[in-house]
Image (spheres, coloured by chain):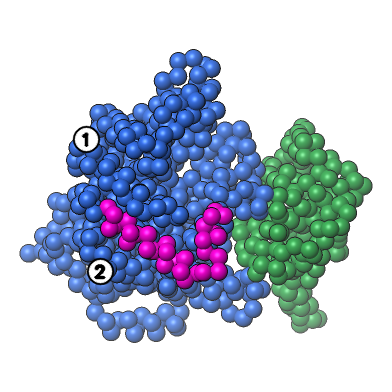
Chain colours: A green, B blue
Amino acid sequence: MKKMTIATVALVAALSAFPRDVSIVVDVAAKPIASVDYSAAGAKLGAGPAMAKQDDFHALVARTKRAFAAFDRGKTDVSPFNGKTDRIWTRYLSLALRDHRKALAHGKDGDFEYLSLEGRGQNCIVAVNPGAEPVKLTVTLKGRQSGDWVLRRVSADAKTGAVTARAWGGYCKRGSPVTLVIAPRSLSTITYRAR
Amino acid sequence: MALAGAAATAFAAMPPATVDLAAEPIKDQRQLRAGTGCGYAGHISMLDKRYCDEFLVKHPDETWKRLAEGGAYVVREWSANDRWQACMALKAAKTAAERDAVVKRYGGIACADPRVVWDFRKRHGIRALLTLENYSVIVDTKTGRRSDDIKDVKRVICDFVHWLVANGYKNQVIGFELSNEPYWGNNPERNAARWAEIVPEIKKIFPEVDIGFPIAEYRAFDPDVAAVRRRSTATDKWFKDQGYYAFSRLNQWSGRFIVAFSNAIDQCSHVIYHFYGGYRSEAVGPSGFSRIHAFAQAFPEVKGKKVWISEWRERSDEDNHCHQSFGSALTKAHYLLSTTASPMVDCTSTHQLSCLAGGFYIADGKGDWVVQWAEHDEGRGYGDPDATGVPRIEIGPAGPVYRLYNEALMKHPLILDTGVWRERIRGEKLCSGVLFYESTDRVKAWYANGCKGKRPEMRGGEQWVLACNPRRTSAVFLIANSVEAYPWPMEFNYKGYRPRGKARCRFYRCRPEDVVMRHIPGEKSLAWMEEKTMEFGKIVIPSMCVATVEFDIEEAK
């Protein structure tokens, strides 16, 4: 029994080490699901009373997913984000919405969800991965050539739940799909050149 | 660890180099108008009036704090005479309407008072290389009328030089560049004839000033040619379908200029190069130094003249993003060591301070980071989530390199020796920088192609320059260590003087896995600084590190 438990734990750990594959095809010629009215979204994102409970990663995930759903309904306003954690994420999400005003698609794969945006010669994927496994994301761009990417990420520590932010730029062969691993328990914006 | 151990064993076979701390210096930077000579093309006041007001008028102390963090002790100003005229016009405007008219006409280059800029430079010991242009000058600031009459051009340039001298800014002037890249389509004989009239007049006003003229020395696939072609339809037509001949015509420009300029060439102390491209066949490395020597062989008129490399970068405008990595900063560090140790090079200016070239990031305050030549909408810029309506400056990944090297060289202006690892090798011949640059390129390609197989190793070399102070009481090693596989146990034998006490080490480093990753303006840097004291014999330079190791010395008995 003890051996089984160890084996099970080992299997789970091994599976966790292999990212789940999620592929997205972004079609820039497709009819957008919504246009971002940044003046409204931006105001909402930065407004509202501070609520201590919102300093929680899962609350943040829920709010971001509700925002995605709003885009599905063609709405452009986003629920207000506040609190310490929210400010870190809002900083990135605001930038994504400000610079990429055309919402192209909203999709999901299990608990992984994404919103695809376009604007200013770039595409942007806003990705929510609340699960404990990494996701290997492959984004194929139809109609334009993709290029190097910038990842802005907010992630929660598995043990403490502490949220940290990190941003860096990586590489993609021009015209090839953008591939990168989305960390577990993270919210990310991935911006890449699309010309 | 096994690899490191094997490497250490193999390396132990070669004895450490013996460096002579009593030697005649390769170069005494006190004698140079450029001082340390490690700086930037561009300067903080070349952006429009809004930036100048914010940075130099409202918050000069905060601005200097930032600039010092990025080691901006040497700058270069394009179109210096035009900018001075515009600033003087703004200063002379008496009414609000007049001021508005000047700002509207010259807002892109005008500051409230040229003294604001020059007093700032004087206060902080900033030295500026000034590019003069002889095509035309402003003769009526109210109407914007310009004149290309040589009498007007000569008068205005001389007025500018006289103003610099009369206001006590001579020590802030490194020298004058006779046109910025005039070889892109202009007539060399006309250009030379005009400068031949102006240069003697400049020398009458400011006899000790250095003056230099540009040399076109480009090669096929030069990244700057590609970048200029994108910006200029005329140049693009010139190169179309006749690559080799176009390069010949471009490079012949310099020969024709030199012949036509023979009357005044002796009054010029420097030749000027703009070098772009970090691969071994390109200019930022031994190939560039060879080109300088080869040109001097072909044209003895320039032999013995010192060199300003007043623009350089391992890539040109075709790739602004590549400059935002620690790998780019380390490549730059290698080249700075090579040029610092080169007896013929007085000054290098990395292109450029106010664009995303690695030294600084400048936010426009409206939501974007400033990019030269390319708009954000082309997907080449970065959005700024922290815009507050006012511009601000942040330090890029290369900034700390300039800070470390400048701070070390200002205290230790005698350049004594140079080499790589345990060998003393002339800086111009060192390939550490180009080897490292090429290895980072392979790593980028590995990432871009989906990280298949083992990541290629990054390997350049452990390049160093040794300098000391004039009293020979302290010395410093300037180091760029771009060997990924193992750290460098720094060992030397000393002659003439010997180290005394512990060494003061400053390391600027980055995790190997982050070396080629781009730093995003406004976000936490992927590299960090460390300062520590270490005992001699136990100094280890971490891999992927830019360092200075400073120590006191005493005469060896």
Q: Is residue A124 magenta?
A: no
The percent position of residue B47, horizontal first and vertical second, equals 49, 38
| Residue lying at the far left of the rendered structure | B557
Q: Residues within 10 Å of mark 2 (few under 14, many from 20)?
A: few
Q: Residue at x 86, y 64 (%)?
A: A110
**Residue A39 picture location, percent across and down:** 77, 36
User: For the view shown, which residue lies furthest in the top direction?
Assistant: B95
Q: Chain of mark 1?
A: B
Q: Secondary structure at mark 1?
A: helix
User: The N terminus of chain B lies in which quarter of the figure?
Assistant: bottom left
Badge 2: chain ID: B
Q: Which residues are magenta?
A: B232-261
Do marks 2 and 1 share a subunit?
A: yes
As drawn, B212 above or below B87: below
Q: Is residue B285 visible?
A: yes
- Asked if residue B407 can be seen in this view, the reply is no
* Circle 1 crowding by C-alpha within 10 Å: few under 14, some 14–19, many from 20: some
- Identify the residue position indicated by label 2 in the image: B297
Name the residue nearer the viewer: A51 or B472: B472
The numbered mark, 2 or 1, whose residue comes first in the sequence reads 1
Spatial separation of the CA atoms under disc 2 and disc 1: 33 Å
Is residue B255 magenta-colored? yes
Residue at left offset 14%, top offset 58%:
B554
> Residue A183 in the image: x percent, y percent?
70, 63
Q: Quadrant of residue B154?
A: top left
Point 86% across, 61% down: residue:
A108
Q: Of helix, strand and loop, which mostly describes the magenta segment?
A: helix
Residue flagged by tag 1: what amino acid is it?
Answer: Ile
Q: Residue A41 appears in which quarter of the rendering?
A: top right
Q: Secondary structure at mark 2?
A: helix
Q: Which residue is mark 1?
A: B205
Q: Amino acid at mark 2?
A: Gln
